[in-house]
Amino acid sequence: MPTPTYHLFVDDSGSRFIDRPSTPRNDGMDYFAMGGILIKAEEARQTTVDLDKICEKYSINYPLHSTKIRSKKKEWSWLGDQKQKNKADSFMEDLSNFLCNIPGHATACVVHRPGYLERYSHYPALERWKLCKSVYSILIERAAKIALRDGRKLAVYIEQTGKREDADICRYHTEMIEKGINFNPVTSSKYNPLNSQDFSSSLLKNPNFFNKSLRMGQVADLLLYPLVKGRYDKSYLPYINLHNSCKIIDNTLKETEEHLGVKYYCFDGV
């Protein structure tokens, strides 16, 4: 009998380039994040069917993209059309209910870029890990620990970004399986990091890349932003709704498992 599997669907958000200045925002958000949904493989198909039904109900034949939905731009401009307000309100309610009742749980690693630069600025640039390596490694390790705990394998599905970026992800993934993660042993010991043997027994060999047409990838996109925004603004309603519905991975953990939850990194003083 094959070992059951968790599927981790991953999107990214924000700028992964630590040394590139960003335009200051009134909300103070300046981050890079990877995350989405950790879900049992056997529950992912029905989740796709349920989201398809919502899209069919509202004649939506284009991807659900968090940024465009929030900005009400391009194909989502109808959300801001007063003549379609009833339809827009109904859709947003259905979408919120879907996310708050979905099998699986939202998870992520979120880095505050100014904090990351301040913490590691004394390291030579070539010795500093890229943001994407830090974030991907932390996200995958935490999900792999949950898979090990539950007697499952972990399959990673991640949105395509570009040839170079995707090649980086493949390299980080392979390194974890072959070598483990070379975290600083002094600062990481309290997290009990996995070794290569742990990764080999829990993590499937290669990440799977998808485009924006994949429904579960769209779910990852819709769940990631509230986890990010909620760290900067605890009153952000989509974050509150997910938390109150126990749809964030932290809601499922015991006190001794705090290091398996959403990781907010370098947010000192924020």
Image (cartoon, rainbow, N blue to C red):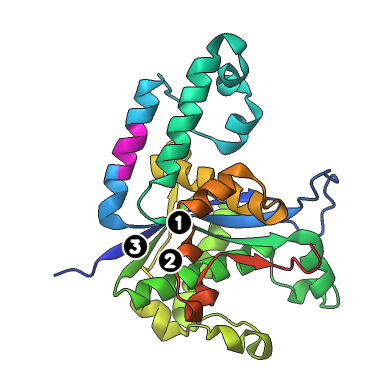
Q: Position of residue 128 (x, y in %)?
A: 74, 73
Residue at the extreme top: 83
Taking the spot 54% from the left edge, 76% from the top edge, the residue there is 259
Q: Quadrant of the N terminus?
A: bottom left
Read off the residue under disc 1: 246
Mark 2 or 1, nearer chain start: 1
The Cα–Cα distance between marks 2 and 1, rounded to whole angstroms, is 7 Å
Q: Is residue 19 above or below residue 53?
A: below
Amino acid beneath label 2: Thr
Residue in the foreground of this view, choosing between 88 and 42 = 88
> Crowding at label 1, few (<14), some or many (≥20) Cα neighbours within 10 Å?
some
> Crowding at label 2, few (<14), some or many (≥20) Cα neighbours within 10 Å?
few
Amino acid beneath label 3: Tyr
**What kind of element bears circle 2?**
helix
Q: Is residue 49 magenta?
A: yes
Start-end of magenta stretch: 47-52
Read off the residue under disc 2: 252
